Image (tube, rainbow, N blue to C red):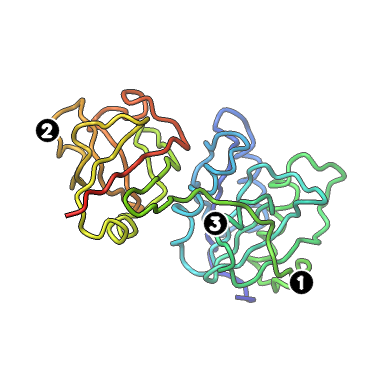
Amino acid sequence: MDRPIDSPIITLTTDWGTKDFFAGMVKGRLLSMVPNARIVDITLELEPHNIPMATFVVRNGCLHFPAGTIHIIDINSVETAQQAFVVVEHNEQFFICTDNGLPYAVFGKECNRVVRLDVMQDSDYYNFAAYNLFCQVASMLAHGTPLEELGTVVSTLRPSTPLNYVDQGSRLIAHIAYIDSYGNAYLDITHAEFERVRAGRPFTMQMSDHTRDGLSRIASSYDDSGSLASAVLTVSATGLLEIAINRNSAEQLLGLHPFDHMIFNFQER
């Protein structure tokens, strides 16, 4: 999409938080460079430097925007010999980020084009890539600069190993990929994937190697358990399986943590 974008959408996914001035700096510069931009916060509250969390958020929060959307992802954005600054084009959207394992974990080999940025920033200091460089690149994309003019086209991204479930036939091992602010835990398997592996078999899910009552079926809603203290296994809006407690925190009450494994034991009919 190498033409100016009318009223471009520019999203921010960062670990800046809201206490400091970083978001204001970047938004001010973006609006100065692209006055008709529509800036959308995906989140400013990523855990600092947490690439797996950022991967989950980008995969579930950024991919369904309209064509031409420009995404700025600022997490562990330090340019080194091993990790360059890049723009990834995927489904006619642009993702400005660092090749630190995140883009590979999100896109794998499915992105259309990847460019390693050669744009010269207008500062002699390199402590805030989102402000000093990513805003400039976003402005160039919004004004129609062809992607290839921003740097060198590359064929590969820095590889990483995304978290993924393990199908062992009679059982399945899933992991907690993300815990939201309500304390709901998202597993690294979609409902569709789970049903394919399950193949209609009854199941019991174990957490921390102890079977918990009420987690042998998939509930249709958070309040399906009938109790404010009972956990449910349900399907989140992302399509992923989710462990939740109605109006309570599954994270706190069940002692859940990211990367904890959940074991689904299948019973043969």
| Residue type (three-letter) at the residue carrying disc 2 | Gly
Q: Quadrant of residue 181?
A: top left
Q: Name the quarter where the N terminus is drawn.
A: bottom right
User: Label 2: how many residues lie within 10 Å, few (<14), some (14-19) or many (20+)?
Assistant: few
Is residue 180 shown left or right of residue 206? Answer: right
Reading the image, the residue beneath label 3 is: 106
Reading the image, the residue beneath label 1 is: 149
Task: Tell me residue 66's x, y (percent).
Answer: 46, 66
| Residue type (three-letter) at the residue carrying disc 1 | Glu
Residue at left offset 40%, top offset 45%: 174
Ranked by sequence position, the earlier of labels 2 and 3 is 3
| Residue type (three-letter) at the residue carrying disc 3 | Val
Say what secondary structure mark 1 lies in: helix
Ranked by sequence position, the earlier of labels 2 and 1 is 1
User: Label 1: how many residues lie within 10 Å, few (<14), some (14-19) or many (20+)?
Assistant: few
Reading the image, the residue beneath label 2 is: 226
